[in-house]
């Protein structure tokens, strides 16, 4: 422990005697002025309204106890009812029943400065002052410069970090004598995430525990023990100085499905591994690089889908998938070379070959697997593979896995490709791989020039039409249609414009037979399910029956780029992808977040998907966007880009 003197700082704001907000911190003396200013600012900007009194109390901290932060788990729930059910199940595991009755008490907690203290079994109220409740005070995360781990900044005190502050509070409360559990519902009408906590189950976030817009909320501390013990519990909550070690600043991204029961304690997880992994995540977070799997938001104007032709939602595809599943089952039950090949696979492979104008085609369960399995089958040790610097990760991984020598040439630079082909010297086989439409910038490969270079060098040519199929070419057959020429291997995916899932190669019969025999991701995977195959097959039929779809889609993307240009934003497109360069990772995220608040989803693309410092927004236009949608998004985007970050 450092010998710097620590001070407890408390803020409390009220209007007409009604509690609005409060905060507690423990900091070294030199941090007091800045913290006091920040907390005052927070008090003045609270959603509950503007206070008419703000109290700041600063006093030297007494004896400090260190506590290890409760382990955190997240339970994803969709409705308040589901949230309450999860809360009940979690607390039941800690021996607390009657949760419905306890939750009903939240109708009484709004406006309380502290928490309701209930006997966990009899539900009697135990606080001496029922209007105020019991407020846990004198606590903070270790790391506010308060003598502890300085690598763990707590962020800007002007803005409340609900999660970080709640974990500190819950850790202190769970460790108070006699407290067997806590349940918290924010009183902020827009904050629907709450938690239950006990020492045994840790801090369990429940993503939806109340209806959006509902102002009811508060905290309930659950006590078990003799009445004589209550005073000691309250004394601990209200007086004992606590610093919480290893308190997280942002909620972990791994989630526990709400329906799965096991208590999320640390048991079974190596704390050492967990600590190391959490450290890496914090590091990523501090660089603006932390990612999470978010559920797709409803009611948002999304420029984030690869379902360019809106075929995933098409009733014809859905019906075909359902019928195939009815006929052959939800899964295929085995790999293709064993008993997994169904009529749906055979029909789709034939259809893909005719759609792309090749002798044959092979299908994999994903586009990633198609790339990895094709490249690693075609080249091996001693061979050379040449890859555009901006190729998709699945191509990069295929090159690595092949154990061939990898030569990366500058993006789209055929002169550099020629140089590298020469530099590699004679080889058993040379393979040149390029995206047809580059996934991050939406630009097109100059296919005729590419093929000419390959021909001269005697190299095998391969393109990935993931973002080209259904988008590029007069009738959406891809870059090969656009330029009217073909490489040796055409790879593509079923999961973008074709609205299904899976990957494919279209090539000569011999090449396809070879891949069926040598591609390990084909051989050692269960065959993709018949539903996905039938849906993709139907998607090809739709594109054949409605050949104007691809050009209509490209026209929409072009109109979006033009609207942005008019608003002073530089960008261009030749496909359905409109990249908007930003540069700084955090600025890109801030602009994307600002758009999302306006109901428009345009994701920020960051390292490692693109180079560091080359962050951008990537808008994918789909055929369902109206001109009004495109104009609105362009106006909001140009406004957000002008906003100071
Ligand atoms: N001690 C006791 N009760 C308190 C305290 C305290 N120190 N601070 C707040 N309360 C009570 C009080 O009645 C408030 O009105 C109520 O809790 C809600 O407090 O993982 O922000 O500070 O993302 O508004 C949960 C975070 C956030 C979930 C809850 O509560 C997550 C939140 P607030
Ligand atoms: Mg609040």
Image (cartoon, rainbow, N blue to C red):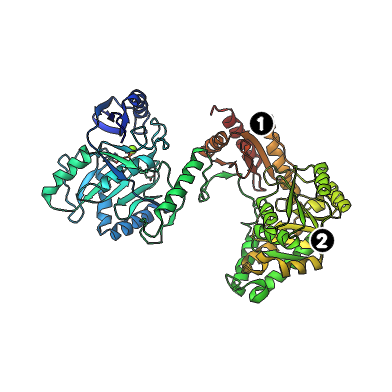
**N-terminal label among 1 and 2:** 2
The residue depicted at 41 percent of the width and 61 percent of the height is 259
Counting the numbered discs, the total is 2
Can residue 218 be seen?
no
Whether 230 is drawn above or below 522: the answer is above
Q: Quadrant of ligand 1?
A: top left
Q: Does any atom of ligand 1 lie closer than 8 Å to the CB of label 2?
A: no
Mark 1 vs mark 2, CA separation in Å: 39 Å
Q: Which mark is residue 569?
A: 1
Q: Is residue 263 left or right of residue 64?
A: right
| 255 in relation to 605, above or below | below
**Residue furthest right as drawn:** 456
SS type, badge 2: loop
Check the image and report above or below for 332 versus 605: below
Residue in front for this viewpoint, 500 or 309:
500
Where's the N terminus, which quadrant?
Answer: top left
Image quarter for residue 398?
bottom right
Name the residue nearer the viewer: 480 or 326. Answer: 480
Residue 559 in view (yes/no):
yes
Extreme-left residue of the structure? 228
Q: Is residue 255 left or right of residue 608?
A: left
Q: Position of residue 472 (x, y in %)?
A: 76, 49
Q: Tell me the element at label 1.
A: loop
Res 636 label = none
Nearer to the camera, 450 or 267: 267
Q: Position of residue 591 (x, y in %)?
A: 56, 35
Spot occupied by residue 25 in the image (x, y as percentages of width and height): 31, 33
| Image location of residue 303, percent across then percent down | 61, 44
Q: In the rendered image of this protein, does residue 30 appear above or below residue 410?
A: above
Q: Which residue is mark 2?
A: 357
Labelled pair 1, 2 in contact (Cβ < 8 Å): no
């Amino acid at each position: 422990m450092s010998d710097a003197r620590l001070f407890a700082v408390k803020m409390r704001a009220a209007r007409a005697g009604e509690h609005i907000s409060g905060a507690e911190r423990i900091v070294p003396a030199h941090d007091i002025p800045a913290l006091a200013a920040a907390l005052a600012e927070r008090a003045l900007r609270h959603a509950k309204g503007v206070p008419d009194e703000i109290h700041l109390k600063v006093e030297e901290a007494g004896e400090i106890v260190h506590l290890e932060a409760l382990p955190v788990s997240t339970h994803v729930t969709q409705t308040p009812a589901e949230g309450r059910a999860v809360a009940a199940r979690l607390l039941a595991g800690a021996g607390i029943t009657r949760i419905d009755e306890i939750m009903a008490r939240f109708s009484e907690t709004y406006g309380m400065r502290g928490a309701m203290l209930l006997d966990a079994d009899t539900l009697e109220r135990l606080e001496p002052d029922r209007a105020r409740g019991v407020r846990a005070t004198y606590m903070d995360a270790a790391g506010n410069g308060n003598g502890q781990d300085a690598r763990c900044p707590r962020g800007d005190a002007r803005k409340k970090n609900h999660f970080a502050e709640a974990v500190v509070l819950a850790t202190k409360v769970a460790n108070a004598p006699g407290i067997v559990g806590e349940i918290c519902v924010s009183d902020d009408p827009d904050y629907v995430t709450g938690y239950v906590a006990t020492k045994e189950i840790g801090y369990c976030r429940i993503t939806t525990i109340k209806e959006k817009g509902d102002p009811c909320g508060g905290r309930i501390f659950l006590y078990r023990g003799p009445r004589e013990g209550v005073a000691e519990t309250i004394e601990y909550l209200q007086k004992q100085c606590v610093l919480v070690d290893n308190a997280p600043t942002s909620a972990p991204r791994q989630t526990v499905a709400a329906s799965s029961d096991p208590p999320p304690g640390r048991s079974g997880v190596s704390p050492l591994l967990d600590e190391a992994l959490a450290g890496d995540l914090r590091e990523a977070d501090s660089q603006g690089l932390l990612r999470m799997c978010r559920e797709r938001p409803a009611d948002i104007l999304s420029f984030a889908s690869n379902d360019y032709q809106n075929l995933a939602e098409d009733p014809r595809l859905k019906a075909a998938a359902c019928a195939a599943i009815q006929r052959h089952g939800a899964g295929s039950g085995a790999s293709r070379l064993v008993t997994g090949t169904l009529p749906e696979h055979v029909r789709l492979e034939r259809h893909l070959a005719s759609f792309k104008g090749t002798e044959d085609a092979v299908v994999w369960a994903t586009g990633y697997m198609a790339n990895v399995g094709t490249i690693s089958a075609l080249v091996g040790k001693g061979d050379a593979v040449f890859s555009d610097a901006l190729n998709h990760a699945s191509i990069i991984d295929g090159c690595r896995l092949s154990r061939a020598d990898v030569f990366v040439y500058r993006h789209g630079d055929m002169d550099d490709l020629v140089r590298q082909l020469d530099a590699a010297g004679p080889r058993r086989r040379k393979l040149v791989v390029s995206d047809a439409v580059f996934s991050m910038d939406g630009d097109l490969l100059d296919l005729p020039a590419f093929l000419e270079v390959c021909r001269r060098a005697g190299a095998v040519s391969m393109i990935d039409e993931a973002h080209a199929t259904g988008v590029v070419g007069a009738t959406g057959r891809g870059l090969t249609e656009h330029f009217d020429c073909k490489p040796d291997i055409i790879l593509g995916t079923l999961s973008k414009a074709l609205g299904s899932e899976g990957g494919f190669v279209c090539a000569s019969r011999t090449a396809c037979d070879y891949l069926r025999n040598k591609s390990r991701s084909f051989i050692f995977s269960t065959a993709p399910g018949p539903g996905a195959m039938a849906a993709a097959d139907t998607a090809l039929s739709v594109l054949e029956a409605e050949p104007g779809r691809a050009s209509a889609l490209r026209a929409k993307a072009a109109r979006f780029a033009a609207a942005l240009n008019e608003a002073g934003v530089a960008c261009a497109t030749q496909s359905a992808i409109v990249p908007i360069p930003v540069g700084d990772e955090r600025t890109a995220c801030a602009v994307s977040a600002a758009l999302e608040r306006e109901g428009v989803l345009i994701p920020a693309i960051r390292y490692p998907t693109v180079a560091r410092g080359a962050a951008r927004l990537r808008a994918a236009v789909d055929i369902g966007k109206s001109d009004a949608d495109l104009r609105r998004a362009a106006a909001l985007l140009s406004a957000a880009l002008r906003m100071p970050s």
